Amino acid sequence: MKSYLKKSKDELLVLKAELEKQFEEIKKEKLNLDMSRGKPSAEQLDLSMGMMDVLNSSVDLKCELGTDCRNYGILTGIHDAKKLLADMSEVSVDNVIIYGNSSLNVMYDTVSRSYTHGVMGSTPWCKLDKVKFLCPVPGYDRHFAITQYFGIEMINVPMRETGPDMDTVEKLVSSDEAIKGIWCVPKYSNPQGISYSDETVRRFAALKPAAKDFRIYWDNAYCVHHLYEDDQDVILEILSECEKAGNPDMVYKFCSTSKISFPGSGVSVIAASKANIDEMQKQLTIQTIGHDKLNQLRHVRFFKNMDGITAHMKKHADILRPKFEAVLNILSNELGETETAEWISPKGGYFISFDSLEGCAKAIVKKCKEAGIVMTGAGATYPYGKDPLDTNIRIAPSFPSLDELTKAMEVFVLCVKLVSVDKLLESK
Amino acid sequence: MKSYLKKSKDELLVLKAELEKQFEEIKKEKLNLDMSRGKPSAEQLDLSMGMMDVLNSSVDLKCELGTDCRNYGILTGIHDAKKLLADMSEVSVDNVIIYGNSSLNVMYDTVSRSYTHGVMGSTPWCKLDKVKFLCPVPGYDRHFAITQYFGIEMINVPMRETGPDMDTVEKLVSSDEAIKGIWCVPKYSNPQGISYSDETVRRFAALKPAAKDFRIYWDNAYCVHHLYEDDQDVILEILSECEKAGNPDMVYKFCSTSKISFPGSGVSVIAASKANIDEMQKQLTIQTIGHDKLNQLRHVRFFKNMDGITAHMKKHADILRPKFEAVLNILSNELGETETAEWISPKGGYFISFDSLEGCAKAIVKKCKEAGIVMTGAGATYPYGKDPLDTNIRIAPSFPSLDELTKAMEVFVLCVKLVSVDKLLESK
């Protein structure tokens, strides 16, 4: 197999016929496999089954400070859970609020609160003519869905190997008062698995925003989600960097245990400066009497401390690593020499980001669907679902079994080849 | 003891001296008792301890339809939980969405969504000059806190024995397009324990609002919270009444298991027309991937069905009834003949509503605090914390033990007498 780019028209036509034959064979298998969402597999969920036993009718349901976790109260979370999740967030307990089961919900509520009530005294965004967010691309579709829902204009910022292009970020943030935020997944980013370099984090912390109510939405979703024990990314802690740079209030940091314990039944946390925390608390006291303290206690009793979480994440890694490696091997073996695709080998997170030849991503995803393989929609990694070059596809290896995944990837690379050949033939 | 109203100045002065002596004695006891919030007692929480055992590492964590409740997905709730809470809400499963642990949170989010995005196509409330809500008074402070937080003007509507004064409601709702909602606790209302009559419910259902986006916020918090097995209030089901009256979309109905299982670790539900549900779902899909399905499953496995909930609520009633009766007996024995107070004997719910002589409620609560008894702040049962006649005090008998409650009520009636005597002396 040589580079497809160097093949003649005739060679491509022969190849196309052969690939189409393979594709017809595969369609007959009537596959039904899903690589679209970053869901843990059942095997991973089994790792947390002990959490179903730590609370029962024979154990004390009081937290460390004596509060009965069964009753109302404790708006910002029980102290034990604050300690655990503050440690995971690498901040002090005074800088966290524990929320419900979904950090996405916390991010939505944070945007919503800024929209209805402003940010620490600023004009509520609903009273402004224009609000904009910067969106490093490719990125997380559910982030973009929130800002789109609130009519916030999204501006693409290209991702580099070190994080978002900071020249662009600095220029835009310092010159446009309408820019109120930026979506960041700083570690093992969704979908590329890129971790921000120290320089990138420091440049974030040192931003001089035109808007006083500008905030960095720092979604540290994959903070402990390493694939390798001996090769892990470490990023600088953004709250302390912001404080050092004289911008203590500029960042909201989000985490959750969704991909640590049980997605949908985890615990989420926001970390921010005391001034931000105080402001959030004022709103939170109107919104709820408190989140689920029994579930907070359940997490504390099961994980005990950060060492417990670290040990637990190694078990996740042992399950995920072979899947990532399988995907990367198939990509490399099947597409490596074709020069029709690029991808990044991440050291953590939940995704592999795949880039096809320009103008091919949509067609590849469509072709996969014909053969029973569901991929994340092409374009989903861009605001408004619009990938300007139509190249990016997010691969989520976690949910299928290794066998299913291998099968699905075989179909995927076949579809990539087919669509690439068609694309190359167009210009012949 | 005769009516205080008929006592002479001299008699009142003698009485005052005697009461003050008693008060000084009681202060020496340095009590620290709380009758301020509607929290279940530890004994009540013990009733649900079995819920801590129904899920464990040995049982299947799939719901009836086969979904693994440990993973992401199922935005609007697992079918089994929908069935249980739809039954409790007296509607069909197609008319409910299951939310997280707090119906207050759902109400907040409902107002917030209307504020940011309008109601089924109407202008978002944040774009309007004025939005108003009707507030039957006395009512629930946390309802009023939500509307106040969003800058919504609150208009008091007097409560009658049959529910809100419907002449006033009809007149206002049909004439003022700025009126977008009304807060209702239709059964065993907070704080009076009043249940709306059939006529009241029918008049609600037949409202002809000037505003197309007017909604009844029907907080059925105490739907199954009876005190007596043989004397229970039954109210008409508002969704079906609205449909009959040609107003199918006019109501949101809220419930939760907060005071059934564990407050803070319960499950909440909204019931509404299919059109409303569809609209909410559109927003919900942006806000979250789903609520805590394991907790939904926990509730289903523990209660099984409505019979299970009904049987469980009898146990709550057995604990609560003696407390309500103790409060009512002390009120009756100590204040009955004084003519300084009025109250209602509820057949369910969590509160007893107490009305002092005009201009006395604040002073009574203050006096109680001096003696170590925390009552709900006077005025809390009115929008903006302003009780125009300063008479209403909400008594919450559930949390203290019977002994503590008896003690606290002895102090309370003493404070009522003292403040009433002072008030009567003012006009002598």
Image (cartoon, coloured by chain):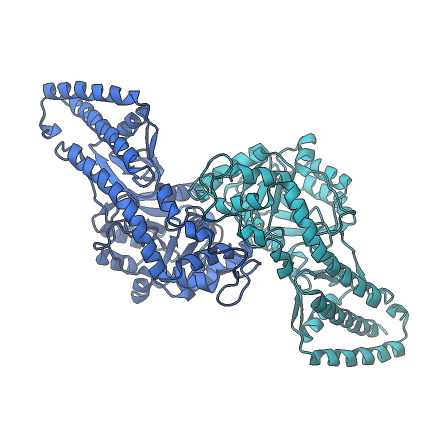
Chain colours: A blue, B cyan
Q: Nearer the viewer, residue B152 or B6?
A: B6
Is residue B41 in view?
no
Quadrant in which the C terminus of chain B appears: bottom right
Image coordinates of residue B240 in percent, x first then y, are 67, 33
Q: Is residue B7 above or below residue A104?
A: below
* A142 on left or right of A226: right
The quarter of the picture where the N terminus of chain B appears is bottom right
Q: Residue at x 67, y 49 (%)?
A: B313
User: Would you identify the image quadrant in which residue A149 lies?
Assistant: top left
Can see residue A230? yes
In the rendered image, the vertical position of residue B401 relative to residue B309, given as above or below: below
User: B10 or A327, which lies in front?
Assistant: A327
When asked about the image quadrant of residue B253, the answer is top right
Which residue lies at the image location 47% right of the left edge and 40% below the top edge? B62
A205 left or right of B149 in image:
left
Residue B355: x percent and y percent?
77, 61
Q: Is B368 placed left or right of B214 in the picture?
A: right
Which residue appears at 76% of the width and 53% of the height? B346
- In the image, residue A77 lies at what x, y percent? 48, 60
Instruction: Point out residue A423 in the picture as x, y percentages from the top left corner.
Output: 19, 25
* Number of numbered discs: 0
Q: Is residue A285 above or below residue B164?
A: below
